[in-house]
Amino acid sequence: MPPLAIRAYTATTALGRGLDAQARALRERRSGLRRNDFAPLAPGEAPLDCWIGRVEGVEEAPLPAHLAAWECRNNRLAWLSLQPDGLPEAIAAAVARHGAERVAVIVGTSTSSIGATEEAYARLEGEDRQFPADLSRPLLHTPHSLGAFVAAATGLSGPCVTVATACSSSAKVFAQAARLIHAGLADAALVGGVDTLCGSVLFGFNSLQLVSSAPCLPFDAHRVGLSLGEAGGFAVLERCDADEAPGSLQLRGYGESSDAHHMSSPHPEGLGARLAMIDALARAGIGAERVGYLNLHGTATPANDQIEAFAVASLFPPTLHASSTKGWTGHTLGAAGIVESAIALLALQHGHLPGILNSRVPDPANGPQIRFDNADATIDYAMNNSFGFGGNNCSLVFARA
Amino acid sequence: MSDSRQTPAVLSAVIEGIGYWSRGLPSWDAARAYALGGAELADAPSRPSPLLLAANERRRAPETVAVALDVALAACQAAGRDPAALPSVFASSHGDMAITDYMCATLASEPRTISPTRFHNSVHNAAAGYWTIGAGAMRPATALSALDASFAQGLIEALAQLAAGDDAVLLVGYDGAATGPLAQVAASRGLLGAALVLARPDRRGAAAGPLLRARFGEGEAGIGDGKLSARETGNASAAMLPLFDALATRHDRLALPAGAGRILQVELAHD
């Protein structure tokens, strides 16, 4: 595929706001996970016994007055995540160059602002169970709350869509943006994703017995499940110029596939995961041996990590450094694609390759590619895997110009 | 820096197959006859029964999943395309609101009793997931939402997939009824699904069909004045129906809402 320039990128997670906070915590091997203090809405219910990656300060960061109609936790996190790392300037530059109507908004989320719907249900009023007035805002109670808010907050008026394929959502936005720009329907795109902690995901994953009561242990022999997190992140993509500055970051390939197996369990041989990775490498026009860092989906559920390690070992040489960073951020669901793409881009830019946090005992199924320790190496290509419910898989390949 | 502003692109595809389901009009044949002045079917089933799912799953599947899979399979059959060979794009404003209502009501009372099946069915890509499982399709599948622009955005993504090299793609639009208190803020009535198999004009399959051309424009799409649009007013996916009215009545121009005061201008060349 023709490379796409990445003019700016950013992530906000339990590690803090912006890329410096992510890079520092990754280098210092400092986790953002904490004991679950996210109070259930049902009266008298204790929080689930687990660890979460909660973004600090969302409660104290109301939206600006002109965006107050969009107020909710998810849109607050979207707004916070739009500010760091020169993103507003990169958006403004794309608008100046192409016009606001030629810049698309393609964002991913799993649950969008359903936290606001949950809250309304916990505060229904009267015999006829009316939504409370402060939450009677139709734009919040639909998956497109996120995309519509980001368009309103940035003034971008190109094609605007919310991708909601569970945990692959904000990886697939890169693929969709690449196609849209290639087809001439836009000249640039703001891509990204936001998901916030809410009852649906905490109690939902708990019902599937996929939540660990201790901090998650990706690729550890003793792993029992995931730790949930919340996050937001964005990137500005643009068609490359003839004279891109050497070293500037690019999207080189994407690969998507379906497991065609089960709604909430991965394909037992990791066939869908393999197809997505093979497709991404093919679109980038490189062999697997050229990849220096692979950010794994690595949720720390027994099934995911086993099949992903298997798929990686079947495709990549032992020299690959592959890791899951969910011990730092938790599984940020629909935001995982953008957050872990940002981590892959940081590795590409600075040569610090994160390992895996908290895990001690490598699972016997791990190939030599799965690395627990951080490492330093100059790499030419970085990759990110994101897999979601419904057997929905996406892999991305990034490189420097 | 050079100014890379381009003239807006026109994308095109051959419509190889059409699927349709709403209560009283359980097939594209029934919908087309109705759009041309016929009556709805008196003895139509109240719920689609998607043959791709195993019998027990067919009964248990959320209504929105059932309708999406029914129209998707019908469109593939009309096109003579193997469902397993097609990438797919699923567009829905709200997903399954009966499940959203269940999740929110349960979280407000007994959160630890959430059903694991209903939780994994609550993802917006539930229909896409069940489709790929039922069809054995390992091709990419996506699930989009953009309020009343959902179908137009799905059509754009489907056309962009063709422009990126795919021979043919499946596009499905669907929405169900709002349930419980959620209906106060997310109005949608009835159950509606429609699907298209779209193929690159230079690589069309055996099935003949109209040529669709689409481009962005400014303006408001307005409410469709065709019989299908008029019948399904109130469903969150009704905004897609001007296209299906035009396909039935062999009209050649229409506009779909594309979000933020923009429209997708669609031209059809019927064969």
Image (spheres, rainbow, N blue to C red):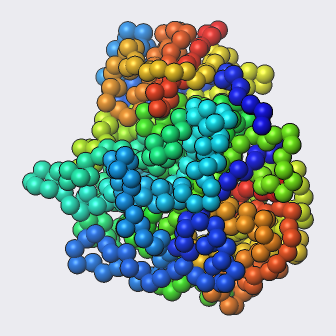
How far across and down, in percent of the image, does residue A183 sit? 71, 31
> Which residue is drawn at the image coordinates 68% and 35% (left, top)?
A97
Which image quarter holds the C terminus of chain B? top right
Q: Where is A355 relative to B202, above or below? A: below
Residue at image location 77% in from the left, 37% down from the top: B1
Mark yes or no: residue A284 visible.
no
Going by the picture, which residue comes out furthest to the left? A127
Residue A276: name its quadrant. Answer: bottom right
Q: Position of residue A131 (x, y in %)?
A: 21, 51
Q: Is residue B215 visible to us here?
A: yes
Horizontal side of residue B179 vs A67, given as left or right: left
Relative to A367, is A338 on the left or the right?
Answer: left
Residue A233 occupies quadrant? bottom right
- Closer to the camera in the image, B201 or B7: B7
Residue farthest toward the bottom in the current orientation of the protein: A360
Q: Residue at x 42, y 70 (%)?
A: A57
In this picture, is A183 found above or below A40? above
Nearer to the camera, A136 or A371: A136
| A145 vs B214, nearest the viewer | A145
x, y (%) of residue A162?
52, 45
Choose between B106 and A185: the one closer to the eye. Answer: A185
Residue plotted at (58% across, 50% down): A88
> Residue B210 location, x and y as percent?
63, 15
**Above or below: residue B72 compared with residue A48:** above
Total number of numbered labels? 0
In the image, taking residue A69 as reference, residue A238 lies left or right, namely right
